[in-house]
Amino acid sequence: MCGIIGYTGKRQAAEVLLEGLRNLEYRGYDSAGIALFTQSGLKTYKAQGRLSQLEALLGENLPDGQCGIGHTRWATHGVPSDINSHPHASGSVTLVHNGILENYMELREQLLRKGRTFVSQTDTEVIAQWLDEEYQRDHEPAAAIRRALPSLKGSYALGILFADRPGVLYAVRKDSPLIVGQGQGENLIASDITAILPYTRDYLLVEENELAIVTPEKVQLFSPIGEPVDREFCHADWDVTAAQKGGYAHFMRKEIDEQPRALEATISPRMASGHIDFSADGVEDAFLSDFHSIQIVACGTAMHAGMIGKYLIESLARVPVSVNIASEYRYSDPIVGKDDLVIIVSQSGETADTLAALRLAKERGARTLAIVNVVGSSIAREAERVLYTYAGPEIAVASTKAYSVQVAMFYLLALHISRLKGTLSAERLSACEKALLAIPQTVKAALETSPLCKKMAADLAEASDLFYIGRGLDYCLSMEGSLKLKEISYLHSEAYAAGELKHGTISLITEKVPVIAIVTQPGLQEKMVSNMQAVRARDGFVLAICQEDAVLPSDAADRVLRLPGPAIDPLFAPLAAIVPLQLIAYEIAVLRGCDVDKPRNLAKSVTVE
Ligand code: AGP
């Protein structure tokens, strides 16, 4: 969603802000702008479209000034336009905003009655005007901010400048993320760490409704009631190159290849003793015991990882599990309480629907465990316990390595809960733990299918509709494979339980509708083969993805893509089979000339409803 950066220090602020906004582009945006304290006062420059539009507006010689704020906007209230772009100014106040002001119409009406007028359609301008109204009372920035905040309903991360406070950045947040970066004689604010990495790796997390006052020499944090807050700085291990493409054509392709390392980084620390142990994560065995059911809640790819989690926990630990779409869950009046464990899955840890579902589960008294990739994100901080995945920064909008490590976390959880409940024999448990430790190598072998996936993509790239089919774990995989294709290649596809095709949907199968059949489960292979033969009997084209040693009748598929390497325990096949599905989607998107890392209409983190 929107990206925020602010700078105050010795450099030319415009260059720092533009550099930071470039690093934030991956969040998805439709306009950008900066505001600077220049020799001739506080100036704002903003333009609809890509950053290049803003750079054209600024011209060759960037404006002077050593303090300012910048913003990339993802439109929520008000269409993408120059005037609706941020920063927004009102009187002495100029600010940028990430989030949604839910009561903006009510506040706008009150301000209109006070004689104020508006130039944009945005909720953000309402905040600027509301804050200026308070500021004009006493020209005290911190006091004015504290008086204004209680009226703001909704989510916000704000970077604020006051015209008569040159060189000072003010920042405050509620629900939307915000950090403060500390440099040498220079300091920054940002929505996330990638914006400030070129200048510092040391940063502070701004907590709910805390106020940060930032000058080149000093970073101060204050509680909502104005008390100074003393907080430890965090240190970002992700250097800028980790967030750069490193020689790949796209972040997504790089991140597909990073999966073995990400899996290693996520699995190993929890198996240091040879057995699964979450104590270093602060997740005690008691927290993972004595509950009636588990409810997994997430969106998109994270929800697809949860589908695998359901299968694993139910089959290994014999605990009833439901998988819930967060945007449905939060409005469904869910039957959840103190006897339930709610597992919240989110790569970004900032997805609005998922965060809301977490808060609802907590209100209802449920135990909440988050599986999150971004350290210190809102979901991570608000859940009772958190298990971090260590995929590193995932820049491509389409999730790949984050999905794999979420699935890996569910293997760890399912096996650990089965151990606590004694539902698996010692032999089976030991074999599973060994298979899990070997997963990074298994996935590394699956990456060798890349050339074949590139060839297969050519067979599929001209289709306008495709099906992904599977049974059991393979059906869960088909959901993720289908989403990958849709979101980056803009081709329509549908995931379907293979056994369900015959109940109507098979009428859509023609020679123009290819079917990708995922067949990694020996116990379901016979049924899968008959589904594949039924598709081919209707002139459908079938690409089968199966294990190295699978024996398929010649009339079951037109193409067969085998997962290389020694036979994989079928229970662990999903972590290998997802790789060709990601690669095929990627190669088709490249063939179709799509913007693979930043697909149209999508954002990396959907921090608004
Ligand atoms: C993933 O490819 C998608 N871009 C999207 O479905 C994503 O998984 C979803 O928005 C949830 O994001 P989160 O994991 O950061 O909460």
Image (cartoon, rainbow, N blue to C red):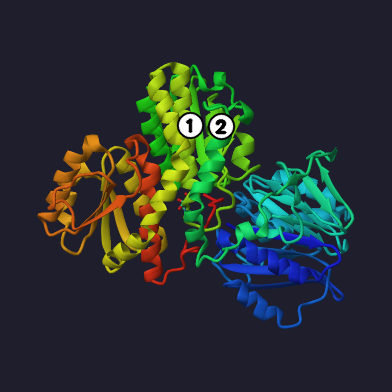
Quadrant showing the N terminus: bottom right
Report x, y in % for residue 581. 36, 53
Q: Position of residue 419 (x, y in %)?
A: 46, 20
The structure residue drawn at horizontal position 49% and vertical position 30%, both measured from the top left corner, is: 342
Q: Is residue 238 left or right of residue 294?
A: right
Q: Are marks 2 and 1 in contact (CB under 8 Å)?
A: yes
Q: Secondary structure at mark 1?
A: helix
The residue depicted at 51 percent of the width and 55 percent of the height is 255
Residue type at mark 2 is: Arg
Percent x, y for residue 232?
79, 40
Q: Callout 1, which amino acid?
A: Leu
Is residue 496 something that shows in the picture?
no
Please, is residue 91 above or below residue 546 in the view?
A: below
Q: Which mark is drawn over residue 412?
A: 1
Answer with the quarter of the image where residue 97 lies: bottom right
Image quarter for residue 32?
A: bottom right
Question: Where residue 246 appears, x then y in whole percent?
Answer: 58, 63
Task: Identify residue for label 2.
Answer: 270
Q: Of all residues shown, which one is farthest toward the front?
A: 566
Q: Nearer the viewer, residue 304 or 532?
A: 532
Mark pair 2, 1: CA separation: 8 Å
Label 1 C-beta lies within 8 Å of the nearest ligand 1 atom: no
Residue 157 image label: none
Mark 1 nearby-residue class (10 Å; few <14, some 14–19, many ≥20): many
Q: Is 106 placed left or right of 559 in the picture?
A: right
Which residue is at the front of the view, 225 or 409? 409
Relative to 274, say whether 402 is above or below: below
